[in-house]
Amino acid sequence: MSYDALRHFADSWGLVAMGVMFLTFTGWTFLPRARDAHVRAATMILEDEDETNG
């Protein structure tokens, strides 16, 4: 495969693959089952240090 063919492939299908991955990862964060993990991550900094260390 020559450089030009590889470059053409990356410009076309690589862009499509990156777009699909972006939409997948962005949509994944809005799934209802992920809500608890996001709330935990958002409030983790406010928890007492003794509670997190046992």
Image (cartoon, rainbow, N blue to C red):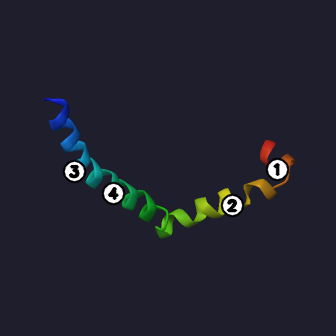
The quadrant the C terminus occupies is top right
Residue, disc 3: 12
Query: What residue does disc 1 label?
Result: 51
Within 10 Å of disc 3 (Cα), the crowding (few <14, some 14-19, many 20+) is few
Q: Which amino acid does the dot numbered 1 rest on?
A: Glu
Is any part of residue 4 visible from this angle? yes
Amino acid of disc 2: Ala
Tag nearer the camera, 3 or 2: 3
Marks 2 and 4, how far apart in space? 27 Å
> Where residue 48 sits in the image (x, y, percent)?
85, 53
Identify which amino acid the numbered label 3 is placed on.
Ser
> Tag 2, which secondary structure?
helix
Which mark is in front, 1 or 3? 3
Q: Is residue 54 visible?
A: no
For marks 2 and 4, the one nearer the N-term is: 4
Element under label 1? helix
Lateral position of residue 7 relative to residue 44, left or right? left
* Residues at marks 1 and 3, CA–CA distance in whole angstroms: 51 Å
| Residue sticking out furthest to the front | 4
32 relative to 48, above or below: below
Which of the two marks, 2 or 4, is nearer to us in this view?
Answer: 4
The reply to whether the C-beta atoms of the residues labelled 1 and 2 are less than 8 Å apart is no
Mark toward the viewer: 3 or 4: 3
Secondary element at tag 3: helix
Which residue is label 4 attached to? 19
Classify residue 33 as left or right of residue 14. right
The reply to whether dot 2 and dot 4 touch (C-beta < 8 Å) is no
Residue 16 image point, x, y percent: 26, 55
Q: Which residue is mark 2?
A: 42
